[in-house]
Amino acid sequence: MAIGRTFKEAFQKGLRALEIDRGGWTTGTPEDDGLPSDKLEDLMQALHTPSAERVFQVKRAMMAGVADDEIYRITSIDLWFLAQLRELVDAEETFRAVKAIDEPAMRRMKRMGFSDVQLAALCGTSEDEMRRQRWDLGIHPCYKVVDTCAGEFPSATPYLYSCYDDENESEGFGEDGVVILGSGPNRIGQGVEFDYCCVRAGLGLRSLGYRTIMINCNPETVSTYFDNSDKLYLEPVTLEDVLEIVRLERPKGVIVQLGGQTPLKLAKALAQSGVPILGTSPDAIDIAEDRRRFGELARRLGVRQPPNGTVTEVEEAVSVAERIGYPVLVRPSYVLGGRAMEIVYDEPSLRNYFRNAVRVSSGHPVLIDRFLEDAFEADVDALCDGQECVIGGVMQHIEDAGVHSGDSACVLPPYLIDDDDVEKMRHYTREFAKALGVVGLINVQYAIKDGVVYVLEVNPRGSRTVPFVSKATGVPLAKLAAAVMVGRTLEELGAVDNTTPPYVSVKEAVFPFTKLPGVDTVLGPEMRSTGEVMGIADSFGMAFAKAQAGADAELPLEGTIFVSVNDSDKRTVTPIVRRFHEMGFRILATSGTAQHLRAKGIPAEPVNKVSESRPHIADLLVSGEIHLLINTPLGKLTQQDDYVLRRTALQHAVPYTTTISAASAACDAILARRSRKGTVRCLQSWYEGRPEAERWNVASADLFSSVSES
């Protein structure tokens, strides 16, 4: 959401807030703008179909000389809006022709919503140089109040937006203020989990006596509810917008580590501009993000990594992949949510990845890691004050390594990882936190294979698992992290390591597949989930069953199960299917899987594949004869039969699993549900008798309340 004094200003602010690498209403390459080429006929054809890129195609048409009436005829965009957009195109041409930028010319462009990035591109200079010119002219935004009481009586909770009028309605808080940068637009890979961290941190800082200033642009999040902070700026989370707000507010500092990748990307530039960053230093953040620097740190600490390399072009990638061996996990650096991350099994696939999936540069290289097959994966969240580090929680992913942590169900405490390996992960996490000088939250991801613990990545920031760990343990990690970032020590906060709770918590992801026809439901390293749920119980099976029910994937207690797995999974799926058979489930399978199961003494009835004669398995799914589907993809490419199976199961609300580990968990859950009935219990009662949770909360409550009273 963007607010401005004019449509043109709000329109451009909204586009740059989207975080799609555009400074406003700008065009990119034909591919970026949804076009097969830069030919006019392709452009005119594309304009007929509404799409996310249509607004940029309209600009291309205007720049190509297409009349507004013709654009209206094709798109039905109201002529008033087209006239407003035409003014932006004309303004660009006028500004580009200016020899020396004066105050009226600059102010006119800023009032039309042009960012420093856009103006710099028009003049062939850098964003920093354009900002310096603007500041030399004395041009800064002012901030207007959105009155939340509509003028009926004085509003105690206003929020603000920027414009380039003359009168400013916001006064800075000075050293009493702390700025929290929000997570920007919610999307797959970054969303409410980071918003939770920002909100809890803000409430904690207010109780410590600070005045909180939130900068965010999403109208649907709790952080932009105007009563949660002392001042809310509904502005794009970009360098330009944040610098201007900090210039006005003169705060104690800015918190960047709670809003995910969006504010984290700004940390270095903000620090270079003289903005005080609270918590972990930008250089420590860069060490963790830069795979070369991180590799050196891991070697120095004696922590093993999967064989890996960093490349900037495809031939380097081929060489590295040959050295470390296929399959490899490839991903761009400095991204969140596993965007453009992929498991690659051979050289042609690797070359195709570089051609289609990712752009590389010396500033943003591609990381290549040996993919650890059949490995357990785990997350550790911890809190550090720069000297002392305490563990918040250790979670095991239920899915195998290779499924993104945001998509994998996870369990706290771990249920299949040895205690020695858990202790190693705790030790390594403390070492990473201290070596990086972390002040606040840190998340570390590990893989365990053949008794060896490998570190996958370190994130010196709040992670998407912080809300889950906080609720599972009763320790308010984000609130305590905010206190640490403004100078409190873990000792003051009653710091104590998380111990193994006497109950089990399971997090399960929620996916949008029903809304996305044609998308395969197989999970991988690129994040796809849009939400998550949680279940707590005294056993793993019951906790997993509750989580599945919360994710609208209620597991059957009886009926028929269909099994179709690849050859490498047949051995591990056999004991799981045996347990289902012993519970009285009827077993159906494809011919190859059925033959294997019968050889192991499990009665399994063969069913035709979709590609074979009817009736086939998809027909049974449609008719409601199948109650649970266990399917793992065949080889590196999902075969059409498997794809049809998963889509049909999804469309007809048949629960399904695409990994053996998830199938095993589902079996545990069904057994738990069949043996006893679940009960309802409040969260607080689970925490009773937990000395570490009580100590954290009592000590921190005393600290927060004493400051508030004073």
Image: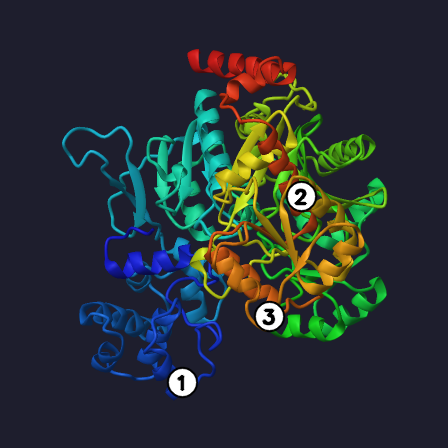
Give neighbour class at mark 2: few <14, some 14-19, many 20+ (Cα, 10 Å).
many
Q: Give, as a three-letter code, the residue at label 2.
A: Phe
Tell me which residue sits at (70%, 72%) in the image.
Answer: 349
Residue 169 percent location from the top left of the image: 27, 39
Q: Nearer the viewer, residue 646 or 481?
A: 646
Label 1 to label 2: alpha-carbon separation: 56 Å
Q: Nearer the viewer, mark 1 or mark 2?
A: 2
Residue 475 percent location from the top left of the image: 58, 24
Does dot 1 land on a helix, a strand or a loop? helix
Specify whether residue 278 is in view.
Answer: no
Residue topped by disc 1:
42
Which image quadrant is residue 82 in? bottom left
Is residue 626 found left or right of 390 in the rendered image?
A: left
Residue topped by disc 3:
640
Q: Nearer the viewer, mark 3 or mark 1?
A: 3
Q: Is residue 397 above or below residue 33?
A: above
